Image (tube, rainbow, N blue to C red):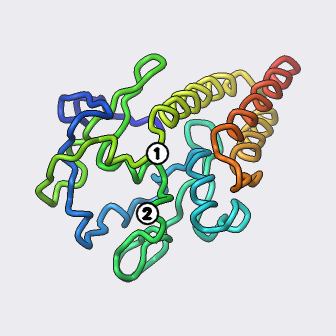
Amino acid sequence: MIRDKSIEEIYDGHFYGPEDMVPVGCSDCAGCSACCRNTGDSIILDPCDMYLLSMGTGKNFADMIEREIEIRRVDGLILPNLMQHHAGADDCCPFLSEAGRCTIHPYRPGMCRLYPMGRYYRGEGFHYILQKDECTGREKTPVLLRDWLGYEDLPRYEAYIRDWHSFKKKAEEALECLTEKSRDSVTRYILQIFFVHPYIMEMEFYPQYGARMEICRQTLKQILAAD
């Protein structure tokens, strides 16, 4: 999701890598769930998020749509995001328990894992940044960024994230050249192939993503050539 702020307004002045210590530790949140409340439609999901949510909940896209997730246009594409459920004075994540704890923590989306960190993309890569105005209510302790993110194979995950980000940028640029009817068809096709079509839980995510991406790129070439 493109932000309309300069990086100087967002980050603490440093770029971080997976082996860096970052001041984000919060004693396992100690019962605080502020970051899970009133987020609107800002928790955008990527294909890996969809896979992990399905693994953690036993539900696919069709089971979760309009219950835990919804879809909207994000920078020209149609992508899913976590819904907010009304709870007392606040809106909150559908996977937040009454005790204020995440019920899908091992399977939580990438944006939740990052917070209050973010990614700053440059060229074909990215740096991690600490968003200086996020999660400001507690004294933070240093945590190894690799551990904070919690991915078993972080280099493989980062390669996937770079590929997904690059694909989205190219797709968004290509959509600008299409007719309205073709744009709608392409955006719905991307949603279908990466999110709606169920993943096989007995297989790891990355080969499934790679196969879908190959099919998608070939299909989009044909659509663009015909439009």
Closest to the camera, between mark 1 and mark 2, is: 1
Residue at x 16%, y 46% (from the top left corner): 142
Q: Secondary structure at mark 2?
A: helix
Q: Which residue is disc 1 drawn over?
A: 152
Within 10 angstroms of label 2, few (less than 14), some, or many (20 or more) residues?
few
Q: Is residue 78 left or right of residue 147?
A: right
Q: Is residue 102 left or right of residue 49?
A: left
Q: Which residue is at the front of the view, 24 or 205?
A: 205
Q: Residue furthest right?
A: 226
- Position of the C terminus, as image quadrant, is top right
Image height of 140 relative to 126, above or below: below
Q: Which residue is at the front of the view, 91 or 177?
A: 91
Q: Which residue is disc 2 drawn over?
A: 105
Residue at x 23%, y 55% (from the top left corner): 135
Q: Position of residue 181 (x, y in %)?
A: 81, 36
Q: Is residue 21 left or right of residue 220?
A: left
Q: Amino acid at mark 2?
A: His
Q: Which residue is at the front of the view, 186 or 148?
A: 148
Q: Secondary structure at mark 1?
A: loop
